[in-house]
Amino acid sequence: MADNENLTPMMIQYQGIKEKYKNDVVFFRLGDFYEMFNQDAVEVSRLLNLTLTHRASQPMCGIPYHAAKIYIARLLRFGKKIVICEQVGEIPKAGKGIAERKVVEIITPGTAVESEYLDGYKANYLASLSITKGRAGFAYIDVTTSSFSATSWSAAKMTENFAKELNRASPRELLLPISLKTNKDIRTVLDSYGNISVSYYPDWDFSSELSFKKLTNQFKTANLKAFSLEKDSPEVVPAGFLLDYLEKTTNSDIPHVSSISVYSDSDFLMLDDSSRRNLEITENMRDGSSQFSLLECVDFTKTAIGGRLLRNWLLFPLTNIKQIERRQERITSFYKDRNLLAKVKNDLSSILDVERLAGRIAMDKAHAKDLQALRTSLESWCKIKGYIEAFDFSFISSENSEKICCLISNSILDEPATSLTEGGIIKKGWSKELDHWRSIHDNFNQVLSEYEAEEKQKTGISNLRIKYTNAFGYFIEISKGKLSYVPPHFIMRRALVNCDRYTTEKLQQLEMDLNESSTKVLELERDLFIEVRSSLHQYIPYLLQIAEEIADTDVSASFAHAAIEHNWVCPDIDDSCIFEITDGRHPVVENHIPTGEFVPNNSFLSAGSDDIPSFALITGPNMAGKSTYLRQNALISLLAQTGSYVPASKAKIGIVDKIFCRVGASDNLAKGESTFLVEMTETANILHAATERSLVIMDEVGRGTSTEDGLAIARAVSEYLVDIIKCRTFFATHYHELSRMENPHLVMLCMDVREDNGSVVFLRKVKEGVTANSYGIHVARLAGIPQNVIDRAKVILARIQSLAQDNPILMEDIPLSEQNNTLKNNDENNYKTPGLFSDEEIIISEILSLDVDNVTPLNALQIISRWQKTLNNQ
Ligand code: ADP
Ligand code: MG
């Protein structure tokens, strides 16, 4: 393509535009299609599965313009930015030059405002990060709702904090200074994050000076003290940059954005990224959907705003007791009055996304249907307020709502058009001028036939007709036989075989009026609509506040519903360090197994107490329910601090400042990192960051290395947690050796298991004590591991158990030549047949489950011979 001379003028025009938007997809309007060329075409055809064609040997693909939104929505999900380039001005006739084209809109994942491009239940964040004097500032904004937040951290702790904030806010677009392009920590975090559009801008655009100005202008304040920001605060730079970018891409001065919420870790219950993932709060670890997440289990919201707020409550649990209790009170009001709850939920379901509607009104992007949606939503909300005014919700007055509803219902048709240019928007009676032009338009046929009658009578031509053709417009038709009656004020237009066509000054005037009235009506409807929409600007802050109230009500009702549905209880929250749960359950597991099958368990820990242990060491075989028990405790404390009821019959929780949840699983293998390294890095983070107020959940940490290493580390970590940090800790381990630890602040718990007719029954009940062994060999046998391997394992196990208890032994110490009979002769006293699955029982269960009809005689003999062997060996 280097050679411009070979290009058509249109392609030259295209390349001029593409030059400016190198990294974006350019939608180039050609007739009824948006076309993409070259690299764009190759990429988009691949992403959207479109046919790739060629034009003058250049790749090209296209989509019909009327279906563009669907394609744009999909491209946005891939993190693409789309530049819409339209034909403007007159479209030249064929062969006469090319139409002028202009970029009319840039749609990016983080700035899109139309509902087609958004997920109603998730905030749509645009984010930016920069580093000022060794501190990273991170800001994110959802321009559709005006939600604007920022935080900061020491640049030395980039990976940890950036991962935490990025994954929590989950923005769709990120803006960075170019100097951070090579930052390894940032790269690492971004690499493991999903589809996001990342763009880099020159560092000089990220300036405290400019950003400070931008923010104060936007918020109309002299400084930023009201938002706890100084000029050189690290949050200022990225926040200001976001505003600048938004103004440029959306072509709007985003008047609804009027404040920013600056937070730090200590304002909320802190959960680092891996704890948040491990607890599967808003998404599961398997496929990232909300299925089997805590969110799914508590989400009974009826509105999109409520859905977004609920997510937010779960991601930002509180640490302030007063605030938590305030939420509890609201939930309790609904919990206690189920009739009221049903009524409120019913009316909530007719409320649309008032927050985003307000955003679109502010950005002049709302259409007439949006305004009607706003009106019906406000009406429903007024009704709900009527029911619940008695509670301490302290709502703002409805006066403005009434004004808004009145304005909309008087001015806008009940079922208006979506387009602004095709009429069908404004109600009759709203504007005298519009009604006047409409009457001309609507009465035209009447006026025309009156005029026709008048001329008929004046001329005496009985078959005189006023007719219309597209090419000609209106004319009077006189048949050849009557031509002698034609009066002088008739102007000859055209002679045909059977008749002649005439016009008159009056007819011309009428036609002009008609044409004018059509244009006038359309113009006026558009202008009047824009006027109504603009007059709603003054109510934006009010509408955003209403949206907040609706969301709050919806979330409170939703938690009340969850509490009733799942039989939860309101926890006592105080500033002690107690963690006392009676009949605690795992909210998600319980929800997904048959009712009544979940076995509830108690927990009782406290930090800083002489009588109550702070550290629970939990042992038990695989599948016994350790992980479930651990997680349920973390989820109960998290739910409690969002203000929710909790799955228990009684709960008393002293405020937790941070929850750490670590799982020593091999899940991270997929990422290609050393699991053990990850495990240790994360463990190190806990030991540095946990305080006496924290809640630590450690599930099988230390698995990723050899037995001795793992055991040693697990033990040292436990000791540090119990002696130095002293926080509430649940520690599940497969290292039975750990149970020899002695400490007054440590309690040994184990998962109860019972042998029942030759099979293991996991009682899922937590009791004090230590499990004798892990039953691993028995489980292995059940799973069909060959008998000689099982036998060999028994020998090794027996030796391990028999040799000096405090001397961990190496595998090589047991020669492979040692056979079962050696064991029988030498170690008989030490080898205790573990309580579960004696050989007889295994055989009996095998007999019982044998499908006799499907066993050949030969097969049966073989099986019997195997049994004999097994029994003889004993
Ligand atoms: P572990 O960590 O000890 O291997 P898990 O916690 O993973 O065991 O539990 C194994 C399975 O047992 C879970 O999938 C769950 O369905 C079930 N389970 C766990 N705890 C309970 C309980 N308290 N009541 C009923 N079923 C449970
Ligand atoms: Mg487990």
Image (tube, rainbow, N blue to C red):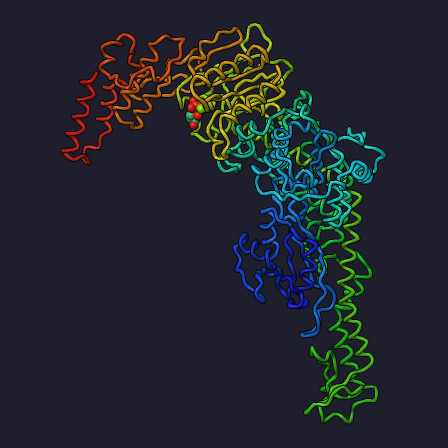
Tell me which residue sits at (55%, 8%) in the image. 612
363 relative to 282, above or below: below
> In the picture, residue 138 is in which quadrant?
top right
Q: Which quadrant of the rendered structure holds the N terminus?
A: bottom right
Q: Ligand 2 appears in which quadrant?
A: top left
456 relative to 655, above or below: below
In the displayed structure, does residue 619 sit left or right of residue 123? left
Going by the picture, which residue comes out furthest to the right?
A: 222
> In the picture, residue 530 is in which quadrant?
bottom right
Along the line of sight, which residue is nearer the eye, 692 or 364? Answer: 692
577 relative to 782, above or below: above
Q: Which quadrant of the rendered structure holds the C terminus?
A: top left
Q: Is residue 583 visible?
A: yes
Q: Position of residue 231 (x, y in %)?
A: 80, 32
18 relative to 715, above or below: below
In the displayed structure, does residue 340 sit left or right of residue 435? left
Q: Position of residue 105 (x, y in %)?
A: 70, 54
Tell me which residue sits at (16%, 29%) in the image. 862
> In the picture, residue 870 is in which quadrant?
top left
Along the line of sight, which residue is nearer the eye, 859 or 464? Answer: 859
Q: Position of residue 748 (x, y in %)?
A: 46, 11
Q: Position of residue 31 (x, y in %)?
A: 64, 66
How many numbered marks, from 0 up?
0
Q: Is residue 417 visible?
A: no
